[in-house]
Image (cartoon, rainbow, N blue to C red):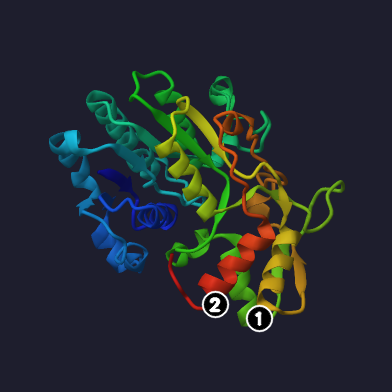
């Protein structure tokens, strides 16, 4: 059996869906399912093929009594709100709960894939390399990123499972994020803003060397994330931290134009000032270094921003479909 935590959430539910498509149906889905029902996350997982649903707080005990039947743990459950600044909220799930799962996977020799984040890189002062030697030098900008980096640093000092991978997700977008509210992707918000108002608002640049709308991120389609995780399940690669991005930064202007094109609508883009409370922490550029990933033999082509946005908008957002 393959365990997927955070299974009612965005990325994990897409991973479960891809595994189903590839013939993996003996899945154990872990989440806070009572809360999922209250926050409209049930459609993310209810039609998946799985063996069992396990409540998140009960899972460590369940794992201990079923360890012999588990082939993988894919731990994607996390608190991901970058606007929340209470560190203790993140310490429970992102740090301490993850430590518990790491120790159990080490004890019972179960391969573990877990969600780290590109938020660990902060403003990018140390670049975006997934080498282990820079982890202690990274300066995340918020408690969410700090909790992820704290776990990465802790994990690197521990006895470890037979295989482990910490995935540093960059800007993921795609189906199954209806429930995420303000933390949904820019594509999701752009789609709804265009439909409601006919235009999209982007942050103005406050740097003289970067034009408005030319702030750049490494946007990656969620199906590409799931494909990479499937590759890790099926191939013998070195353990470690891995960036999960395309390796090609694209501008917010490119993204906005892609949404208009997917909708078949004329472009109307307005620029507004970046709020003062986040202006000094605003990232103008992120881009994953992918050499380490490519050296594992992973050769799949990442979906272009234009193709990913088109599929997401036309096949999922417009018909309100889930993957």
Q: Residue at x 45, y 63 (%)?
A: 176
Q: How many marks?
A: 2
Residue 311: assigned label: none
Give the mark, 1 or 2, whose residue is nearer the N terminus: 1
Other residues around mark 1 within 10 Å, as few (<14) / some (14–19) / many (≥20) = few
Q: Quadrant of the N terminus?
A: top left
Between 242 and 91, the residue placed more toward the observer is 242
Q: Is residue 202 left or right of residue 245?
A: right
Q: Position of residue 283 (x, y in %)?
A: 68, 45
Q: Position of residue 108 (x, y in %)?
A: 22, 27
Q: Is residue 181 visible?
A: yes
Q: Which residue is mark 2?
A: 318
Q: Quadrant of residue 161?
A: top left
Q: Is residue 261 left or right of residue 322?
A: right
The residue sitting at the right extreme is 208
Q: Position of residue 310 (x, y in %)?
A: 63, 67
Q: Which residue is mark 1?
A: 197
The relative height of residue 152 versus residue 229 in the rendered view (above or below) is above
Q: Quadrant of the C terminus?
A: bottom left
Q: Residue at x 35, y 34 (%)?
A: 112
Q: Residue at x 69, y 50 (%)?
A: 279
**Which element carries disc 1, helix, strand or loop?**
helix
The residue sitting at the front extreme is 23
The relative height of residue 274 versus residue 116 in the rendered view (above or below) is below
**Which element carries disc 2, helix, strand or loop?**
loop
Closest to the camera, between mark 1 and mark 2, is 2
Q: Quadrant of residue 8?
A: bottom left
Between 162 and 154, the residue placed more toward the observer is 162
């Amino acid at each position: 059996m393959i365990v997927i935590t955070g299974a009612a959430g965005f990325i994990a539910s897409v991973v479960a869906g891809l595994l189903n498509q590839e013939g993996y149906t003996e899945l154990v889905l872990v989440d806070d399912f009572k809360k999922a029902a209250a926050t409209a996350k049930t459609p993310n997982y209810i039609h998946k093929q799985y063996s069992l649903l396990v409540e998140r707080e009960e899972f460590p005990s369940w794992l201990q009594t079923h360890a012999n039947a588990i082939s993988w743990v894919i731990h994607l459950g996390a608190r991901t709100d970058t606007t929340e600044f209470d560190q203790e909220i993140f310490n429970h799930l992102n740090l301490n709960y993850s430590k518990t799962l790491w120790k159990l996977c080490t004890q019972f020799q179960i391969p573990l894939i877990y969600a780290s984040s590109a938020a660990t890189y902060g403003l990018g002062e140390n670049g975006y390399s997934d080498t282990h030697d820079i982890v202690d030098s990274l300066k995340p900008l918020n408690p969410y990123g700090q909790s992820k980096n704290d776990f990465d640093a802790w994990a690197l000092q521990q006895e470890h499972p037979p295989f482990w991978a910490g995935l540093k997700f960059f800007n993921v977008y795609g189906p199954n994020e209806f429930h995420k509210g303000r933390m949904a992707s820019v594509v999701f918000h752009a789609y709804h803003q265009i439909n409601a108002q006919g235009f999209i608002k982007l942050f103005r640049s406050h740097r003289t060397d970067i034009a408005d709308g030319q702030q750049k991120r490494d946007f990656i389609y969620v199906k590409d994330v799931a494909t990479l995780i499937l590759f890790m399940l099926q191939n013998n690669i070195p353990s470690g931290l891995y960036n999960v991005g395309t390796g090609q930064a694209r501008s917010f202007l490119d993204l906005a134009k892609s949404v208009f094109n997917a909708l078949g609508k004329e472009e109307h883009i307005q620029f507004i000032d970046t709020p003062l409370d986040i202006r000094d922490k605003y990232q103008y550029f992120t881009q994953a270094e992918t050499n380490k990933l490519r050296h594992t033999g992973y050769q799949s082509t990442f979906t272009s921003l234009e193709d990913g946005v088109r599929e997401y908008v036309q096949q999922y957002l417009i018909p309100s479909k889930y993957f």
